[in-house]
Amino acid sequence: MKINLIRLSNSLDPNANFKKEDDQFIEDLNNELFDFDIELVSDKKDSKYSIVFIETGGSEQHFVKIEKDLPRPIIMLSTCKNNSLPACFEIKTYLANKDEDSIILFGNAQELAGSISETSKLLTARNYVEGSSLGVIGKPSDWLIASKVDNNEVKKKFNINLIDIPSSELKEEIDKGVLDDIPHLDNINKLGKDNEYLEGALRIYSGIKRIVEKYNLKGFTIRCFDLIEEYKNTACLALAMLNDEGIIGTCEGDVPSLLTMFFVRAVSEQPSFQANPSKIDLKTGNVMFAHCTVPLSMVKNINFMTHFESGLGIGIRGDLSERDISIVKITPKLDRALFLNGKIVANPKLSNYCRTQIEVKFEDDEGLYNLLREDFGNHVIVVYGNILNEFLNLLHFYNQKK
């Protein structure tokens, strides 16, 4: 990635040698950035991102002349020499007075390389999120009494458009009986060999896919239990397949889960697992999470079973890798989130729970306490690896917006 570098200075000393020092500083910084596949390039005007290098004090008026043409948020770089840092703070306050965000980066070349890498990840994630459209197909399930959100608040806070789509519109697409091009169909057919529900599940997949394309959605949530009544089938397979395709899909019309899973994709580029906290072992502090759909790429030993609550359609059982995970969930008020680190230690196969089950041991003794303390509704989102810093940075950005 090449990032546009804009250098601003205003030295009163004609013999000042800061230019030579700053040239070496940028060279050293680019050497450190090489490992992150990032380079700062002057006059790279076609770059999505710019960094303003405030080399000296007195640069403020130069900044004012160019700031309207800079991408947002404004990112400033300081050497902490030649009154560079106080100039950055003056500019930061100038922007804050206009209700605009800015970021000041400083430190040695190695420290700055890490900061620039993290900032570029944040900006990439933010660009993925903002202006996106997410669909709500049908209303949230009746039992989600605490998980409803205001569409206007989502637009105001995250610049995400929530589009309400009637269930009848999806049913019209499903009733066409048309199977669109289906990725990895041979593998799906092998997994669902002789399964009486497979063709119907693929029709549901195709119907949802056409709705996604019609509204240009990056994701959706669906009132899926209505499909059981109407078609004696489920959206579990459709959600599993679409999440693998990068189209975020969540169950039961759960919008906070949809937003959380969307943010997870933005910061990690990974699929994730929407699950219920289903069983707690007070002796070990371990928690079992379970659901009837999971992205197929996240699991092995896949088995197409029936949906747990109804005994109909396709519910997916698979084993997740026994490795470190993050558990996250934006709360329905959209003002904070649950964040937990843990490790999958087992894949139970208990009969009285949803089909895909994981037993999680938390990283520390506070894990179970934090799970019980936070008000997040009845679902959490599970993703491989530790993404909490990236997730927090993105959520913090929106929580700081005025």
Image (cartoon, rainbow, N blue to C red):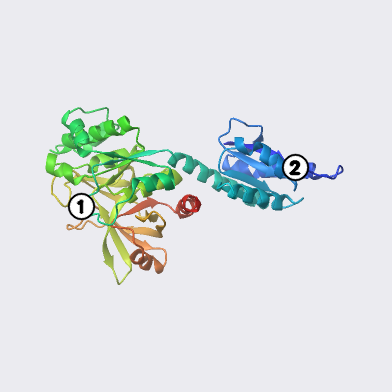
Element under disc 2: loop
Quickly name the residue at label 1. 142
Give the residue drawn at x 79%, y 42%.
20
The x and y percentages for residue 93 are 63, 51
Query: What's the amino acid at mark 1?
Result: Asp
Q: How many numbered marks are there?
A: 2
Q: Earlier in the sequence, mark 2 or mark 1?
A: 2
Query: What's the amino acid at mark 2?
Result: Ser
Is 360 situated left or right of 144 in this image?
A: right
Asked if residue 323 shows in the view, the reply is no
Camera-nearest residue between 304 and 110: 110
The x and y percentages for residue 205 are 24, 35
The x and y percentages for residue 75 are 61, 45
Determine which of the numbered discs, if any, sits on residue 9 in the image: 2
Q: Examine the rendered structure and indicate whether residue 288 appears above or below residue 89.
A: below
The x and y percentages for residue 43 are 66, 32
